[in-house]
Amino acid sequence: MSRIKDIRFILKKYTYKRPFCIAYGFVTETENIEIEVITESGIVGYGESAPSFRINGETPEMILALESKVKDMILDKEIRHYREIFNITDKLLSSPSLKAGVQFAVIDALCKECEIDAWEFFGGVKNEIETDRTVSVRSIEDRIEEAIEIYKEGFRIIKIKVGEDLNKDLEAVYEICRNTEGCRYIVDANENYTLKDAVYFVKKLYSNGIDISVFEQPVSRYDIEGLKYVRFNSPFPICADESLKTKYNALKLIKEEAVDMFNIKLMKSGISDAIAIVELAKTANIKLMIGCVSESSIGINQSVQFACGIGCFDFCDLDSHLMLEESDFRGSFRQVGSKILVG
Ligand SMILES: [Mg+2]
């Protein structure tokens, strides 16, 4: 038995190797909060919160301010009773990235105590996954150059950010596909198309012989009817990202038949809702992707352990650590080109 004796929040700053640009916004640096859960036997479990204002309305200051609240909530709790800790931390409604970091740190401590790996705790289904890499929204030339670079590094799943200018996006997708033969493509509009543009975009790609694997969050997160409309007018599968944070969102999206795929991110859902969403998706025959926000290697480790253990993700978009300058690699996984290995 091992109870939680202390919890520490540590602010970490990371710079992007090059600015990461999505429709109407870009980032050059990120502030993440490392979470340490220390047990009475001296075991330290590590987690990371990567707050996102755009996705969750969170700031690093908000997360740091909750340190004493989290202590009030779970100090003295037994880590083997992790479901009880999940139930308590489900109350962190306005800071899901903190919920993720705390819940994973508890699991990490529990796994260390039981001498198993976290991917085994989550189910041990796979010991290897393949990640994509992401092409930012930039000039058409820069987007092609970045895609070719990714291709030459051996990545065969490419995520293409769109949503700023329909015609430039179409041209960029054509050119990227022409220059990276044999790849699979995830195209992500980050909520920034109108319904009309979204349908025009996919039909235009299809009529030009372009095959994309997934079209992610074409319209506003709140426009569930709109997602459904795009889905039933698209030759390609439609994926919810910003529309999907909690298990309740997942249930609504399933009831409305709005999408073919869910993009689960621990930073939106924590571990507890992510597990529930996986089960809902499997039950409803919805495909799954796992994504990231701006996690460093220690934060991406959380999603790697989860994705390998659960073993049911059709696409893994776990590349934020590859975009950040980091002096020490701190994941419990090995990155070999596009492959991520555990165990
Ligand atoms: Mg997305």
Image (tube, rainbow, N blue to C red):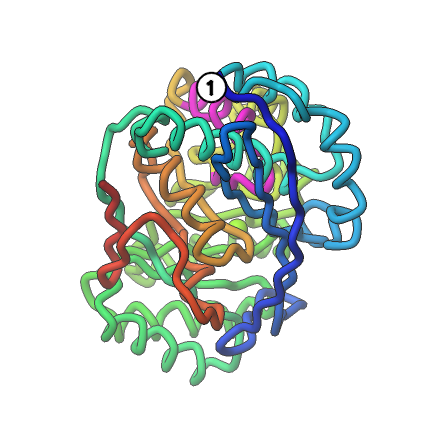
Query: Which residue is farthest front?
Result: 41
Q: Which residue is mark 1?
A: 280
Who's the residue at 51% across and 78% down the image?
18
Residue 232 visible, this angle: no
Residue 303 spot, x, y in % from top left? 43, 42
Who's the residue at 34% across and 57% down the image?
132
Residue 189 on the magenta segment: no
**Prevalent SS, magenta region:** helix
Q: Is residue 312 above or below residue 295?
A: above
Residue 245 spot, x, y in % from top left? 61, 34
Q: Which amino acid type is shown beneath numbered disc 1?
A: Leu
Residue 154 spot, x, y in % from top left? 21, 67
Residue 22 visible, this angle: yes
Q: Is mark 1 within 8 Å of ligand 1?
A: no
Disc 1 is placed on an element classified as: helix
Q: Toward which corner of the image does residue 165 lie, by quadrant?
A: bottom right
Q: Is residue 57 left or right of residue 115?
A: right
Q: Residues within 10 Å of mark 1 (few under 14, many from 20)?
A: some
What segment is highlighted magenta in the picture? Answer: 263-281
Q: Is residue 235 left or right of residue 81?
A: left
